[in-house]
């Protein structure tokens, strides 16, 4: 490979985006319904190995037992365990629009019964990096009921709370 | 000890020229480039190939059923074949498929082909937009209702991983930067690498944040390129080459459906499960001492460091110290990614095939300027992709 | 019944979004072979095939490798603008990106000098009068852009 001769390049340009309607399914519909109607986080506990699943799922990932209706209530508070800040534009998969920025994304461990909990990836209200600390207590802030749609974004973000 | 019904060896490898953009060729011509080189390497012709396994991710490149378009140029016309998709690990999964077919006796000589011809860069604005669209395209592999709306592609994954490691391990950013510089130094010795810039630790530490705390130079590029490998049965391999590279074992491990579950602490359970299975099945009790070269799929320099621990190459919290003192350099105790790794060359679909190819070249002693200066009897190639598929191939000079 | 009964009453929830975003506005580069083929259409209104010397076959549209023997093809051969209609079909259903208003005909046309056929549209014709074996000729567009529509359509001779 000696000299790189640049041949004429003929491209045919096309964009390929198509919309799709995703069903949440039986178990996830239940949890999204609870977010929408009651502003509650309803997860599920495996009857066999006691692992907590958020969102609730039909079968336990670890031991494959059927989870049935062992609902557990989680949150609305939790602790921040990890966080990042996006510095590049990103595309919103719902609308296809390019967003210049987004608030810090964080993994929040929602409080569960008897010291247990479950993780959720969401946004923080706090944008000052200096103020975000591991273990920081936060609480879910919901949209007003009439605006909720039964989606993860029914929770606007997590707000830092003093305890 | 032979693991498979029939022993399988790598008898030929081929790589295309790799760059950010290869506008001189279309996808099938790019695939053809590495296949012709692979056939030359094995001294075989298309008539000697019994079957072709195609690796691809159709949703990323705008051509459905790509194997149809590729057929003539991948020597597959009227031949048996199969197409595999497992995200970024597909280059490895396709090889595993080929190994299965040869080991089972279904075919004697199988060609694996993996090609990536993404959109290609236009200009600085499109490149940024291209970055967002590329991440969004890969986010299509995440759960639609639960994970996608926050995630910004695999980039965010590695940012979380970096923050987590920074918080508990005491690692310095200099150590990570040194690891990135090692990759660049190795890539400059590899004619098929994409990024061959002589970068310094300062360059890495001053590169902008893409997703804090991950810096631009700590993450892989987007490359266009292709790779091909030929696997053969023991009987055929011995006739084809006097330097067969034996496939001692292959392992795959897969993870959970929601990435969110894997975020705290960042849980690379499937990296671990796959590696532990590989060591156990092959009686390897101390991989740091018993493996001569390791080609790991490192989408980010952070991954190269942190996954050393998850793969039981060293203890938790130890990896950054080993990297800091040069243990993973090309002439170090444990050469890791002498090719420059994925962080230097990332065509995605062929990236794992390239890890296996580089490991095989090291065993053969044919890696040229980036050959490690020690005897190589056993090498491992690793692949990663999608929702944490991990593929491993153990290659050796000695017949198992 | 697989799911617990109480879940039967829960309203099913859907979310609409983009199934997959393409990696960028995809530029399907036509490649080494395609570049020459389309440049000849655009610049010279000439149609080229490529020949395999081992199999004595002329491929049109041209490609890099012979499918039978895998020889790397390099011998360009100009083929005629005129050819034979091997088969055809008539499109009645309206849809997106159609070259004409339906009904219109698409055919496989083997140009003189080529051993393979080109799929293209047939124009300036009475759809009732189409027949297999009829002779057609390429009509080029006035404005040409280096793509397959530089040939506007094939018309009966």
Image (cartoon, grey):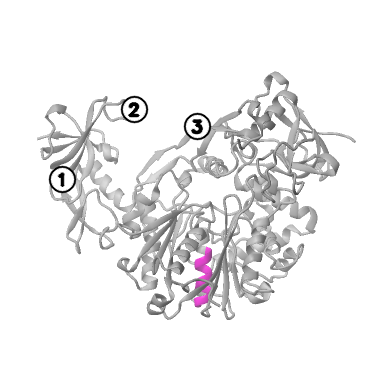
* Furthest-top residue in this view: A146
Residue B190 visible in this rendered orientation of the protein = no
Q: Earlier in the sequence, mark 1 or mark 2?
A: 2
Q: Secondary structure at mark 1?
A: strand
* Furthest-right residue in this view: A163
Residue B338: percent from left, percent from top? 58, 69
- Quarter residue B393 falls in: bottom right
Residue A79: percent from left, percent from top? 81, 41
Neighbours of disc 3 within 10 Å: few (<14), some (14-19), many (20+): some
Q: Which residue is mark 2?
A: C95
Majority SS type along the magenta span: helix
* Furthest-front residue in this view: C1
Instruction: From the viewer's perspective, tell me whether residue B398 is left or right of residue C117.
Output: right
Instruction: From the viewer's perspective, tell me whether residue A29 is left or right of residue B102.
Output: right
Q: Secondary structure at mark 3?
A: strand
Q: Which mark is residue A19?
A: 3
Chain under numbered label 2: C
Chain under numbered label 3: A
Q: Which residue is mark 1?
A: C111
Tell me the CA gap for discs 3 and 1. 41 Å
Instruction: From the viewer's perspective, tell me whether residue A131 is left or right of residue B70.
Output: right
Neighbours of disc 1 within 10 Å: few (<14), some (14-19), many (20+): many
Q: Secondary structure at mark 2?
A: loop
Tell me where the magenta segment starts and ends, as one range: B355-365
Tell me the CA gap for discs 2 and 3. 18 Å
């Amino acid at each position: 490979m000696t000299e790189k001769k640049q041949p004429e390049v003929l491209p045919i340009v096309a964009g390929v985006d198509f919309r799709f309607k995703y069903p949440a399914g039986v178990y996830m519909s239940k949890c999204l319904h609870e977010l929408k109607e009651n502003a509650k986080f309803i997860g599920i506990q495996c009857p066999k190995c006691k692992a907590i699943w958020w969102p609730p799922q039909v079968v336990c990932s670890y031991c494959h037992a059927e989870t049935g209706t062992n609902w557990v209530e989680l949150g609305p508070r939790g602790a921040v365990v990890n966080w990042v800040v996006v510095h590049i534009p990103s595309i919103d998969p719902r609308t296809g629009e390019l967003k210049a920025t987004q608030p810090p994304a964080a993994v929040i461990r929602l409080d569960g019964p008897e010291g247990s909990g479950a993780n959720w990836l969401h946004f923080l209200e706090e944008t000052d990096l200096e103020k975000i600390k591991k273990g920081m207590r936060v609480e879910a802030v919901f949209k007003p009921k009439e605006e909720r749609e039964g989606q993860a974004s029914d929770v606007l973000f997590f707000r830092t709370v003093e305890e | 000890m032979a693991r498979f019904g029939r022993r399988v060896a790598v008898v030929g490898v081929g790589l295309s020229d790799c760059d950010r953009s290869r506008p001189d060729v279309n996808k099938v011509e790019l695939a053809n480039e590495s296949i012709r080189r692979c056939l030359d390497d094995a001294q075989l012709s298309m008539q000697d190939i019994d079957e072709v396994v195609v690796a691809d991710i159709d949703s990323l490149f705008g051509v459905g059923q790509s194997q149809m378009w590729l057929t003539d140029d991948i020597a597959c016309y009227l031949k048996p074949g199969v197409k595999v998709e497992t995200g970024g690990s597909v280059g490895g999964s396709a090889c595993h498929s080929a190994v299965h077919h040869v080991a089972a006796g279904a075919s004697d000589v199988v060609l694996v082909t993996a090609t990536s011809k993404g959109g290609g860069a236009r200009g600085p604005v499109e490149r940024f937009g291209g970055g967002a669209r590329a991440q969004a395209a890969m986010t299509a592999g995440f759960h639609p209702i639960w994970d996608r709306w926050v995630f910004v592609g695999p980039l965010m994954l590695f940012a979380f991983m970096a923050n987590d490691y920074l918080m508990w391990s005491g690692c310095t950013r200099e150590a990570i930067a040194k690891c990135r510089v090692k990759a660049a130094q190795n890539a400059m010795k590899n004619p098929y690498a994409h990024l061959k810039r002589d970068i310094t630790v300062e360059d890495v530490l001053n590169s902008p944040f893409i997703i804090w705390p991950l810096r631009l130079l700590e993450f892989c590029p987007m490359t266009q390129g292709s790779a091909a490998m030929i696997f053969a049965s023991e009987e055929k391999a011995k006739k084809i080459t006097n330097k067969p590279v034996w496939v001692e074992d292959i392992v795959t491990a897969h993870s959970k459906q929601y990435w969110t579950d894997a975020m705290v602490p960042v849980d690379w359970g499937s990296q671990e499960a796959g590696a532990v299975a590989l060591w156990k099945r092959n009686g390897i009790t101390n991989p740091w001492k018993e493996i001569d070269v390791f080609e790991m799929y490192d989408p980010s320099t952070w991954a190269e460091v942190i996954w050393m621990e998850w793969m039981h190459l060293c203890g938790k919290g130890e990896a950054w110290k080993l990297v800091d003192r040069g243990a993973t350099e090309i002439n170090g105790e444990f050469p890791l990614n002498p090719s420059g790794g994925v962080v230097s060359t990332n065509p995605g679909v062929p990236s794992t095939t390239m890890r296996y190819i580089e490991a095989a070249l090291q065993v053969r002693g044919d890696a040229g300027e980036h050959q490690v200066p020690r005897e190589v009897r056993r090498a491992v190639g690793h692949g990663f992709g999608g929702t944490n598929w991990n593929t491993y191939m153990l290659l050796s000079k000695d017949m198992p | 019944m697989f799911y617990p009964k109480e879940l039967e009453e829960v309203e099913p929830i859907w979310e609409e979004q983009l199934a997959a975003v393409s990696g960028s506005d995809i530029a399907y580069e036509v490649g080494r072979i395609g570049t020459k083929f389309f440049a000849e259409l655009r610049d010279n209104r000439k149609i080229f095939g490529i020949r395999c010397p081992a199999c004595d076959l002329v491929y049109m549209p041209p490609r890099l490798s012979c499918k039978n023997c895998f020889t790397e093809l390099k011998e360009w051969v100009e083929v005629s603008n005129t050819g034979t209609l091997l088969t055809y079909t008539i499109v009645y259903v309206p849809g997106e990106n159609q070259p004409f208003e339906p009904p219109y005909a698409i055919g496989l046309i083997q140009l003189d000098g080529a051993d393979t056929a080109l799929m293209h549209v047939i124009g300036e014709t009475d759809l009732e009068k189409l027949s297999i074996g009829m002779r057609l000729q390429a009509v080029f567009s006035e404005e040409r852009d280096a793509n397959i529509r530089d040939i506007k359509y094939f018309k009966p001779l």
